[in-house]
Image (cartoon, grey):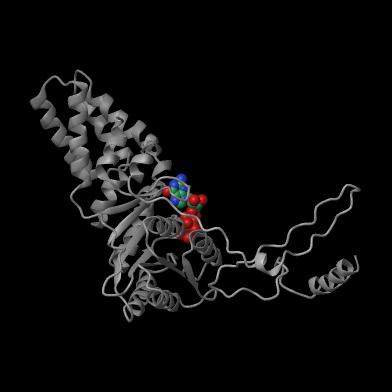
Amino acid sequence: MVVVIAVLAVGGLFLFRPRGKGLPPVEAPPEPQIPDLRVPPQEGPVDREGGTTTTLPPPEEELLKAPEIEVPPPSAGRMVRLRTRLSRSQNVLGRGLLELLSRDRLDDDVWDEIEETLITADVGVAPTRAMVEELRTKVKVLGTRTPDEVRGLLKEELLKQISPDLDRTLRTSSHAGRPAVLLVVGVNGTGKTTTTGKLARALVGDGNKVVLGAADTFRAAATDQLQTWGDRVGAAVVRGPEGGDPASVAFDAVARGIEESADTVIIDTAGRLHTKTGLMDELGKVKRVIEKKAVVDEVLLVLDATTGQNGMRQAQVFAEAVNITGIALTKLDGTAKGGIVISVQRELGVPVKLVGLGEGPDDLAPFDPEVFVDALLGD
Ligand SMILES: Nc1nc2c(ncn2[C@@H]2O[C@H](COP(=O)(O)OP(=O)(O)OP(=O)(O)O)[C@@H](O)[C@H]2O)c(=O)[nH]1
């Protein structure tokens, strides 16, 4: 009892010392890039008499207990697992086209409807025209069509527009004794930080050692968010002061990756859409600074599939500022406009490499054109 009172008195004094709002009662602030290994103090439970009892802090060994590190699943076959998430696009685009093309008489009005369906699903004007023309010719040759033939025809045309032969491999393996470096760029709000975290998770699940660089120094929340993603899978997160130089964070992250013999360093950059020159300068500097230590293997542009033409215009600004090597198309589960896969590749001239198909931590999949088209048309 005496000991409890003494501890409470000392603890009380300590608690009332002036400190930052909302900070937990720990002795010293944690080092920026080291996950907080301490267990937060427990609230005292209410005792039978209605008062509260105070639980003494657990012994030192327990305080230093490492947080549970998750073992994420590997990324292979994810698009198959997640294909039902494309149901909105399937209903509008896939089913719509199948129904129209199965009609007995395909007059101009029906072809107009086919064209409209493709345009509404964000396929883009030029690819729509090309598809309609090809379909018209092939339908003429076929004459009467069985449902299987219609499906086969559509599959062939959609696949052709998605260019299944494009190289969609994400270069994430270390080379020449250095980690692969991925820069993640895009407008804030597109799911950039989430995608960086999900990608890190997928790579860890595939057996890679990953270091994350929180170079979006303009948004403190983005850094904290990335820290949480990293902590969950045991990936180190290199962060800088709020408003600090993104290039310096990127440099430190790559240095840490080399030091720790990591396979992949993923750098989340700031996505403020100011002027194109400003963006060019900023991303150019980040890239130049990284190249003092390693090679930038991938520049992934994150694009929100639900933003349509507006998102595409913003994406173009990024594509002009930096040499994009792949697109991560997010929120494809929340849209009927799955045709954006076709238009974005065509407009930016780079393949979609990853797709976001939900809010869950493992809802990011390597893009597989064949699975995508099958999902649109329904099995
Ligand atoms: N349904 C769905 N939601 C997603 C997907 N990717 C991200 N999100 C969600 O989108 C929400 C908003 O994300 P964002 O506002 O872009 O946040 P962020 O990831 O921090 O993006 P930045 O602002 O660029 O750092 C979050 O709740 C994410 O879980 C996806 O593929 N599908």
- Horizontal side, residue 367 vs residue 66: left or right: left
* Residue 170 in the image, given as x and y percentages of width and height: 29, 59
| Residue 209, picture quadrant | bottom left
The residue under the point 60% across, 66% down is 37
Instruction: Name the spot of residue 237 as percent of width and height, x first.
Output: 48, 69
Can residue 268 be seen from the camera position used here?
no
Q: Residue at x 28, y 37 (%)?
A: 118
Residue 141 drawn above or below residue 123: above
Quarter of the image for the C terminus: give it. top left
State the quadrant of the N terminus: bottom right
Count up the numbered dots: 0
Find residue 296 and report its horizontal and vertical position in percent. Answer: 30, 71
Camera sees residue 296: yes
115 above or below 360?
above
* Spot occupied by residue 60 in the image (x, y as percentages of width and height): 69, 69
Taking the view exactly as shown, the residue that stands out farthest to the bottom is 292
In the shown orientation, is residue 273 left or right of residue 145?
right
Q: With 6 as the anchor, is 277 left or right in this view?
A: left
In percent of the image, x 30 and y 69: which residue is there?
174
Residue ranking furthest to the left: 141
Nearest the eye: 121 or 254: 254
Task: From the viewer's side, name the closer residue of 373 and 74.
Answer: 74
Against 339, is 71 above or below? below
